[in-house]
Amino acid sequence: MMKDNTIGARLWRTAIWLFVGFFVLNLFGMIAAVVTSSFATRWLGTWLPAGWTTRWYFAAWSEFQLDDILIVTFQVVFAVVALAGLLGVPAAYALARREFPGKRLVMLLIVLPLLVPPITFGIPLATVLYRANLAGGMSGVILANLVPTVPFVILVMVPFIEQIDPRVEAAARVFGAGTFRLFIHILLPLLIPGVLAALLLVLVRTIAMFELTFLTSGPTSQTLVVALYYAVFAAGVRAVQSVDAMAVIYMVSTLIWLLVALRFVNPAQIVTRAKQQTAN
């Protein structure tokens, strides 16, 4: 295909690149400002701070009780990851291997929580959980986060399972392998890359999930992102540098897990799969 070199096309490409460059520049500018502020002794009306210090990180750790918040965060995250895997992988296997009436509708319903904003279903979901006396604690936060994460695991795992030749499973059964041995010795080794990719992305997604966690958490079940929100908007006078230090801690912890996850999965494949499921 020949590249369109008309004036209109070149102007359009230039405008797109300028927009992308402006967006990236602003993004890195905001991140740099927060990081710089977290290390600044004082920063008022100058290009660079008057001095540098790490005391704001120690102040944030003490003031916001980040040790307790991080423990709660990872308790929630790993519980969601484990339950999403236990529920999502068998469901994905059933959807990949079985044909039944209404399968397309089921797939559409599964993908739906990933396509709509979490706040759309988060408020009625939180209402139901509060009426059932589940919200306000750890269990409510975990259950709320399972709503988008289980479909996410299914969406990631279905393509991996479909790539496995069913004749491999049939041959294993011919040689006497039961369901348990078939799963442990045949399917699990083949599915490990997909399972790791799905669960790592669920981990990152849960750490960054604000809406559902905010609506269902209580004083003792706040994750890091919710605690950061309260640190910014709660009543009282707080040093800006201390809040920025907390934001940097959140950003770094999320970024580390995201980089690990990206080594196992290509996000473009997930987006393409979601479009294919909705189109079908």
Image (tube, rainbow, N blue to C red):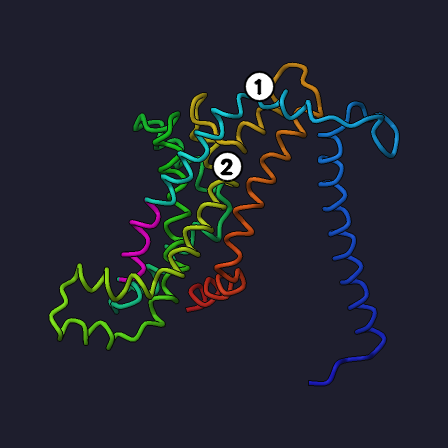
In terms of depth relative to the viewer, which is nearer, 222 or 58? 58
Amino acid type of the residue tagged 1 in the rendering: Ser
The residue that mark 2 highlights is 211
On the rendered structure, is 212 left or right of 130? right
Amino acid type of the residue tagged 2 in the rendering: Glu
Across and down, in percent, residue 65 comes to 53, 21
Magenta region includes residue 279: no
Name the front one of labels 2 and 1.
1
Query: Does residue 65 sit above or below 264 in this rendering?
Result: above
Across and down, in percent, residue 278 comes to 44, 63
On the rendered structure, is 114 left or right of 146? right
On the rendered structure, is 144 left or right of 103? right
The residue that mark 1 highlights is 62
On the rendered structure, is 91 left or right of 200? left
Residue 103: quadrant of the picture = bottom left
Residue at x-position 52% and y-position 41%:
208
Q: Which mark is residue 186?
A: none
Query: Does residue 97 sit above or below 260 in this rendering?
Result: below
Local secondary structure at mark 1: helix
- Of all residues, the one furthest to the left in this rendering is 176
* Number of marks: 2
User: Tag 1: Cα neighbours inside 10 Å, few (<14), some, or many (≥20)?
Assistant: few
- Classify the position of the C terminus by image quarter: bottom left
Residue at x-position 77% and y-position 80%:
4
Residue at x-position 62% and y-position 22%:
58
- Classify the position of the N terminus by image quarter: bottom right
Q: Tell me how far mark 2 sits from mark 1, CA to CA.
A: 26 Å
In terms of depth relative to the viewer, which is nearer, 24 or 109? 24
Bounds of the magenta span? Answer: 83-93
Residue 237: quadrant of the picture = top right
